Image (tube, rainbow, N blue to C red):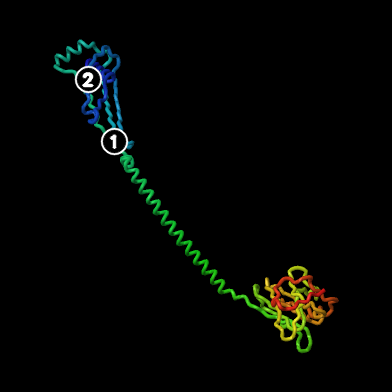
Amino acid sequence: MDDYEMRFQLALVAGLLSSSALAYGNEGWGNTGPKAKTIVKYVTKVQYKTKTCTVTKTKTCTVTKGGNVTKTQTEVQTVTVTATAAAGGKDGGEDEAKDDEKGGEPVKVSEKPAKAVEEPADEAKDEPKDDAPAKDEEAKDEAKDEAKDEAKDEAKDEAKDEAKDEAKDEAKDEAKPAPKTHIIKAKTDDDGNDVFEPATLKNVATGDTVIFEFHPSTHSVARGTPDKPCQPLEKGGFYSGFLRVSGGAKSPTFTIKVEDSNPIWYYCTVGKHCQGGMVGVINPGPKDDLKAYIDASKKAPSNVSPKEVNGGTVGSPKVKRILRV
């Protein structure tokens, strides 16, 4: 390459740097706008051997519709010119003369806009906004259906649980034996002894009822303690009061309810009936001995009655109750 060609190409670089541009149309993306012009200038007395110049221009355009991206285009243009010549070139006039003799023409460089590259937007962005309300309605309907299904399932589960609980309760109730009623008679036997019959009552369940029936002549019942025979239990006891019965009259009663499985010691508070052995026990333990209780009662210095009727229910209102003073 001679000095003239080098100067010519450098002039092209200068022109490109000063006036090169990308052209875009409205819809054709660079097909209808004015094309870049080539400007040629001469540079004299260039003192370097090689010069390379690259011009790159990029433009990106995004089109939106209804708030959603519908099209994205990018256009890139790159022009690179390299000129090389020996140091100490000649002026432009001499170079022109040489080119005229050779019949050469200056090299023309035209800039063409690069093809636009279309980048499709995401599918989610391509969907128009008009579909959003429909999707919202569908989501609401689905949520309602799910809520209904969950409510139905919960109702079914609750019904099943309730049925199971009721069945268990019924089974428990059926398994439990019905409360029983036990009878103890307070009377004077054929030998003239004042006794409770039976004196020992075993296997009385909690919740069962014990009815004391009173026969001629006059008797009572009070809860006591084996440690202090013929004396009432200080707390949590019961007392029927004196009940007199004539021959052939209907027997009065005194009813108590068994609250636990502990032994219940009791005695008659009339006269010397307790010292005479008119005592008894309900649900005695393995080591409880009624005979020992009778023997201890015989040695009791006194037979003490509680101050008032309590702890049970007296039956037959026609019965004549005698209060001990």
- Numbered label attached to residue 220: none
Count up the numbered dots.
2
Instruction: Residue 324 in the image: state x and y as whole percent.
Output: 81, 75
User: Which kind of residue does numbered mark 1 sit on?
Assistant: Lys
- 52 or 172: nearer the viewer: 172
Helix, strand or loop at mark 1: strand
Helix, strand or loop at mark 2: loop
Instruction: Residue 102 in the image: state x and y as whole percent.
Output: 14, 16
- Numbered label attached to residue 71: 1
The answer to which image quadrant residue 108 occupies is top left
Q: Is residue 255 visible?
A: yes
- 41 or 237: nearer the viewer: 237
Q: Residue furthest bottom?
A: 190
Residue 68 vs 287, above or below: the answer is above
Instruction: Residue 299 in the image: state x and y as whole percent.
Output: 84, 78
- 183 or 165: nearer the viewer: 183
- Numbered label attached to residue 38: 2
User: Looking at the image, is mark 2 or mark 1 nearer the viewer?
Assistant: 1
| The C terminus, quarter of image | bottom right
- 250 or 174: nearer the viewer: 250
| The N terminus, quarter of image | top left
Q: Is residue 289 visible?
A: no
Mark 2 or mark 1: name the one nearer the start of the chain. Answer: 2
**Left or right: 240 as drawn, with respect to 105:** right
Q: Residue furthest right?
A: 301
Mark 1, other Cα within 10 Å: few <14 / some 14–19 / many ≥20: some
Query: What residue appears at the point 50 percent right and 64 percent down from the top-left corner?
Result: 162
Instruction: Residue 274 in the image: state x and y as whole percent.
Output: 80, 79
Q: Dots 2 and 1: beta carbons under 8 Å?
A: no
Residue 23 vs 172, above or below: the answer is above
User: Which kind of residue does numbered mark 2 sit on?
Assistant: Thr
Query: What residue appears at the point 76 percent right and 85 percent down from the top-left corner?
Result: 188
